[in-house]
Image (cartoon, rainbow, N blue to C red):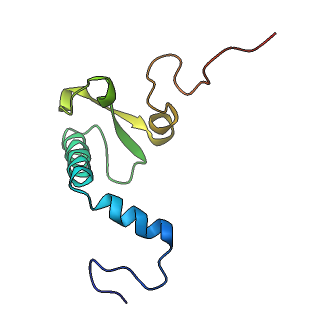
Amino acid sequence: MPKRGQLSATASKRSKLQRKYNSKPAQKKNRAARNTARAAAVKAGKAKKGDGKDIGHKKALKNGGSKAVSNTKVQSRSSNRAHGGSIGNKAGKARGGRKS
């Protein structure tokens, strides 16, 4: 068994790349912010441990939203990850219309 912080000899290339990506300072900071938001939601009674819910942002971070607790909401895991960054009544739908 590898020591803490080391990869096993049989680790896949994808696993090694993911470990490298997740160890970057920016990703550690993002992960800490997600954990803080989750802990605040649990403390407020909005979410429970193991409930299968995600803590999403009302206004997406990439659209200028903040990481403040007031900008978070509890969503099902599928709805939070399905919208792909677009929020509103077109969430999860392909761009463009049906061609006649």
Left or right: 66 in relation to 13: left
Q: Nearer the viewer, residue 1 or 17?
A: 17
Left or right: 80 in relation to 47: right
Q: Nearer the viewer, residue 62 or 88?
A: 62
Q: Can you name the residue that lies furthest to the bottom here?
A: 1
| Residue plotted at (24% across, 27% down) | 71
| Residue plotted at (51% across, 24% down) | 91
In the image, is residue 84 above or below residue 33? Answer: above
Q: Position of residue 47 (x, y in %)?
A: 31, 42
Instruction: Name the quarter where the C terminus is drawn.
Output: top right
Q: Position of residue 76 (x, y in %)?
A: 45, 38
The quarter holding residue 41 reads top left
Q: Position of residue 81 (x, y in %)?
A: 47, 39
In the image, is residue 7 above or below residue 49? Answer: below
Q: Position of residue 31 (x, y in %)?
A: 26, 51
In the image, is residue 34 above or below residue 14? Answer: above
The quarter holding residue 37 reads top left
| Residue plotted at (21% across, 47% down) | 39
Instruction: Name the quarter where the N terminus is drawn.
Output: bottom left
